[in-house]
Amino acid sequence: KPEPQQQKPEPQQQQQLRPPETSLSLCSMTGDRSTNVIDLKSVVNSLNCGIHRTLVTEVRQSTGISYSASIKAVEAVLTSLGFNIPVLIPLTKAILADIAVSPSPNSAGGNSASNVDWWQQSSDAMQAVQILEELRRCKDDEQQRSWALHEDLPTITQHLQQLLDLMSEGETDAVRAVFCMQDFRPLLTLVQYYQMETRTSLRRLLLQIFGAACSMSASNIMFLSSSVLPFELARELLSSETSVESLEYCALVLGMVLSRADPLPYTHYNILNSTFVSLLLTGIEEYSVMANTENLAHLYMTLLLAFNLQDWSRQYGTQQNQQNGVIQSQHPDKSSNTEASTDISSESCKPNSGRSQTPNLVIQLLAARESTTYFAEKILLLFNREEDPLEMFEHETEEQRESGSVRHSVLQLMEDLYSCPVTANLLYTNDERVLCDIILRQLTDLSPQEQRRVSYLRTSIGVVVYGRWLEHQHRLEELRACYSSVIREEEEDAVPIPTGALAVRDTVRELVNSTELLKS
């Protein structure tokens, strides 16, 4: 006989019999929501503080992606789990918080006393230590000091490539901390190894590592600038036997090392002298027209911008005699112009009030050159685009650039060009009109509180005083209105003003009072 059909429960009863949708048991299958919450809390409390590192390592080993990409993948999965399974939110939040508060060095790249050994938890850091130790042994090998063993080339290449991969794809904070150990001894080892190594392939790998080190932190740049590396790179650039590809590597890395204008040892100016700057200026002109060398001309321009940021009062005091003879060494056959050229280099070409009142080696040599066509073209193009080729690192924040702690190399060089009567005439008249348009546009758009506005004001004063502006009087009404607005700003100063703004304002007032054309 067929069994009698059971009566279907009411919808409300059916709902009561169904287990809760979000009740996922982690430690028991009781189906009771309160029990599950308690079990989940116990799981959260028992989590290892390094659970996020374990998850990231598993993702890296399974996929082969970089450390930063693995962190993003873990965060995306945890966030999605918490959103779709609300009962797991305490667990996912705990792991995400562990990622956010994971120990790391301070912003400068050094180690604090409280977590000096935090990086030892990272497999990337320990692998970097092992590789650096192997490279130190290669450097200290007596056989390596006398001749290169061709049998060890694959081994050393592998070590350098692994180290480069760790720097670009590994745990950046941990690897950075390794390079800071013992007052940057790992970086010193690599610099010494570059100094003694003669094989081109290994030297290029080392240059790539130096470039990656510069991208890691400003502290690495500061150490490299004080090491022997700038001297070695400049010597290689001056060598006639260096290939174009090697010149590009050397110019790029040296531009990175000099990009922050950190003080250089006095001995470096024995090679970073007038001959070196003349090489850069000549390269900018020649490589701009040669086939397949335009990139090298761009790198030389970047290096020149970086070198111009140096504090010239430091090196001028130690090498005054050498700089006084700059023009004679560059044009020994032009005896009739020697006296006038020396006067330009020692007296006329001094910077505006934004810089120390000492002669600028770059401006001295530009004033003495007969042809600067491509240099003028490149600097005006960069000035118009508001581009700074030295802004290449993520560790330089936008706040540092706006505050002026990191100077804009293009604005600085344009200021210096228009602080000298000779270099103020490097641009053609039409190009100077374009320059006036750019300056007025920036002065109109920028607020009085922005540091860059001070640089544009200084350059505009140089255009009026030393340039050809009194001849063409381009945008006279706009410039007059702009200067009047600058003078009136003194009564409206209610917020902190940028460094040098008061001095520039006084200069504008004196210029307007002494120039009939600019008076309202």
Image: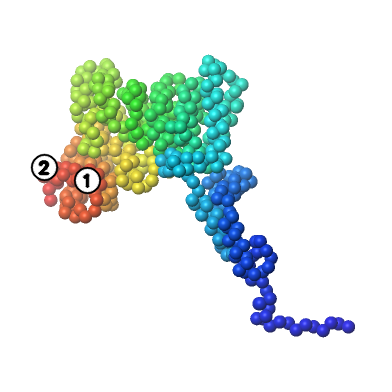
**Is 347 placed above or below 83 here?**
above
Q: Which mark is drawn over residue 514?
A: 2
Give the residue displayed 57% in from the left and 34% down from the top: 162
Q: Quick check: 145 above or below 395?
A: above
Residue 515 in the image, given as x and y percentages of width and height? 12, 43
Looking at this view, is 316 or 476 the one in front?
A: 316
The amino acid on which the numbered mark 1 sits, given as a three-letter code, is Ala
Residue 178 visible within the image: yes
Residue wearing tag 1: 501
What residue occupies the far right of the structure in this picture? 1
The image shows residue 81 at horizontal and vertical percentages of 59, 60
Q: Position of residue 202 (x, y in %)?
A: 53, 26
Q: How is the image coloured?
A: rainbow
First in residue order: circle 1 vs circle 2: 1
Q: Position of residue 268 (x, y in %)?
A: 35, 24
Q: Which amino acid does the dot numbered 2 rest on? A: Ser
Gap between marks 1 and 2, in whole Å? 20 Å
